Image (cartoon, helix red, strand yellow):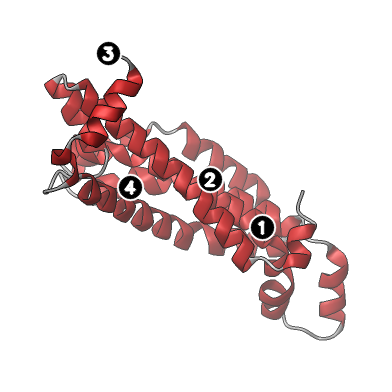
Amino acid sequence: MNLFHFISDFFRDSAHWQGYDGIPTRVGEHIQYTLQALGIAALIALPVGLVTGHYGRGGNALAFIAVAGRALPTFGLLVLMTLLVGFGMVNVMTPLVILAVPPILVTTYEAMRSVDPSPVDAARGMGMSEAGVLFQVELPAALPLILSGLRSGAIQIVSTATIAAYVSLGGLGRYIVDGLYQRDYEKVVGGATLVAAMALATLGVFWALGRFAVSPGVRSRVP
């Protein structure tokens, strides 16, 4: 049986569309984990990136944090957190947030530093406060790149949130972990397909968000 047969059989099985282990339930859990981790990561990374980018300080420190964050093994962190705090959401959220903070933080900093200095200087010359310059001049111009950092973080979380299944939580990782344990490769392939589809859907969401949130003038200048 080839890959496409596994996918077809998985989605045609009505048992996979209902109950606590049904696709709607598992997709909803996966979305919940993703939104929680992305929200926490954004609350940490966006303010730091905006402020450091606005003042042009701390770039080396942010680069170090990004390298360190990307070097940490996600599954190893999950095991460590489980040993420290036991089973629960905290030990899943911690590695997911650490995974998502570096791309959001560094991209936000670089986005702020890439803003054309001419309107910034003009705003200061007109007496605008630093907060006004940040939120009314720099942030709108930097928004496309900031969204790209959020998009990168979101996709990494979507792809990695399957680790929740290893600590008895839900999400699409349940199909992969349970399928491997049961040697049910139809379930494994179906779960992997759903994760890939959710990653593609995440790209679509951020594309639509960029069309809605970014002004046409700024969007036309983004390569």
Residue denoted by label 3: 1
Taking the spot 46% from the left edge, 63% from the top edge, the residue there is 43
Between 52 and 146, the residue placed more toward the observer is 146
**Badge 4: residue crowd in 10 Å (few <14, some 14–19, many ≥20):** some
Relative height, residue 39 to residue 98 (above, below): below
Q: Amino acid at mark 1?
A: Pro
Q: Amino acid at mark 2?
A: Ser
Residue denoted by label 1: 144
Taking the spot 54% from the left edge, 61% from the top edge, the residue there is 46
Relative height, residue 193 to residue 143 (above, below): above
Q: Could you tell me if residue 76 is visible in this image? A: no
Residue 211, percent across and down? 63, 62
Closer to the chain start, of discs 2 and 1, is 1
Mark 4 or 3, which is nearer the eye?
3
Residue 159, percent across and down? 39, 38
Closer to the chain start, of discs 3 and 1, is 3
Residue denoted by label 4: 94
Relative height, residue 65 to residue 50 (above, below): above
